[in-house]
Amino acid sequence: MSWTIFFTAIISSMLINNIVLLRFLGVCPFLGVSKKTESAMGMSLAVIFVMVIASFVTYVLYYFILEPLSITYISTIAFILIIASLVQLVEMFLKKYGKKLYRSLGIYLPLITTNCAILGVVELNIGSGFATEFGILNGLFVAMSTALGAGLGFALVLFAFSSIRERLDQAPLPLAWKGVPVALVTAGIMALAFIGLGGIV
Amino acid sequence: MNDVSKLQDFTKGIIKENPVFVALLGMCPALAVTSTVETAIGMGILVVFVLTLSNVIISLVRKLIPDEVRIPAYIVIIATFVTIVRMLTQAYAPALYESLGIFIPLIVVNCIILGRATSFASKNNVGRSFLDGAGMALGFTLALFTIGFIREFFGTGGISYGVYLPLATEGKLLNITSPLFNIGILTGPAGGFIILGILLATFKQFDLNKQAKLKALKKAEALSKAAQNKTLGGLA
């Protein structure tokens, strides 16, 4: 088992299949919290954190509980409950043991439950069948690398986009284009740029 | 009076409070599944089903659920309907199931559904919640259809049918082979963002024009009133 598989998983989910621009997951927080670079960074940290833990827990749940009992059809309900309680747990844990981290991530954590990027990445991990391709244990690490890459891709795009948006606010635009419409067109142009990264791996 | 408000419950979601174009909710599916008209309509049908039924059930049990566990309870109800819809799609429209992919389970976290559950169904009776859910979901479908139509028509020069939805025939409407209607990026990811941005700006411009007109009308009215008062005062 070589490290290149994990590295490839991170790069491909970060740049080639960027979750925001090419898979359209997490567009709501992408438009919502990208007005300031600082809040964009807080949100992306929270997303990376929860995404990696969630993909670990759901992977274990799916392959060690749901599949042996052959009740995989309830996976969606199970996953969303896991994510919701996980977010709650992380919030409580940080409140008690990580005051500093809590102060910077606190307000973003409750928003994450309904962030479709988390459930999306979890479903994609299960759907792409890493367990049959790499074996159950290695599949777990590939799934977690994919989640890490997806979170990093989210952070990268959010950071770049918030920087662009801070300047767009100063730009003399027609009133109808201000805010979300011009942000969407900008995102479209960024998506075009990301399509160009398709051949890296 | 009662009938009028009932009708408003239904119609407000379609245009005036359209979930995508006005409230900016449910952007992820609005961008992701609208590369063809058929997938857009397919998604719309699924959301009509889930949103209407979840609104009805949540409205039925709204007095039984304690306030502290409201959101988790709603999510479980919504997730149940999404699972039902997922299985039905897999059985009866496998091509649609394949092409919508993870966006079927992601209906669970669609902000429109949870938003209507918390802001409407948890406060109103079953009939009104049903109408509200159906109206909002139809507004969502209309928005998806609009985006999908523009993207597919200008991207491929026609609207194909029977590929994803289980229709009796298969074919293509409006087959135009002109480079003007063959803009490749529109069917790709970038096209979704750009078309939605342009549409939002267009609707905002309409809104601004309407507001300006109303303002001008009010001003003219006030002026004419003032003038009338003046002449009346002069006569006295």
Image (cartoon, coloured by chain):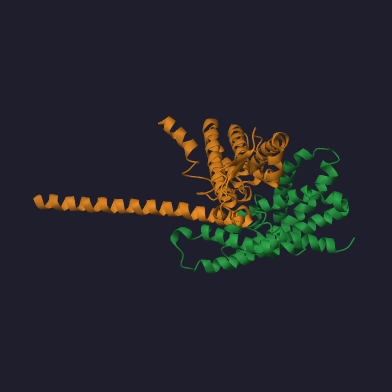
Chain colours: A green, B orange
Judging depth in this view, the residue of A119 and B30 nearest the camera is: B30
Which residue lies most toward the left here? Answer: B235
Quadrant for the C terminus of chain A in the image: bottom right
Judging depth in this view, the residue of A115 and A132 nearest the camera is: A132
Q: Quadrant of residue A23?
A: bottom right
Quadrant for the N terminus of chain A in the image: bottom right
> Residue at (81%, 63%) from the top-left corner?
A7
Which residue lies most toward the front here? Answer: B177
> Residue at (38%, 51%) from the top-left corner?
B210
> Residue at (53%, 46%) from the top-left corner?
B146
Q: Is residue B145 visible?
A: yes
Residue B111 x/y as whole percent:
60, 47
Residue A143 x/y as whole percent:
80, 55
Q: Is residue A94 visible?
A: no
Q: Is residue A1 left or right of residue A77?
A: right
> Residue at (63%, 60%) from the top-left corner?
A191
Q: Is residue B30 left or right of residue A127?
A: left
Residue B185 x/y as whole percent:
61, 57
The answer to whether B179 is drawn above or below residue B117 in the figure is: below
The answer to whether B142 is drawn above or below residue A55 in the figure is: above
Tally the marks: 0
Judging depth in this view, the residue of B152 and B134 nearest the camera is: B152
Residue A117 x/y as whole percent:
68, 53
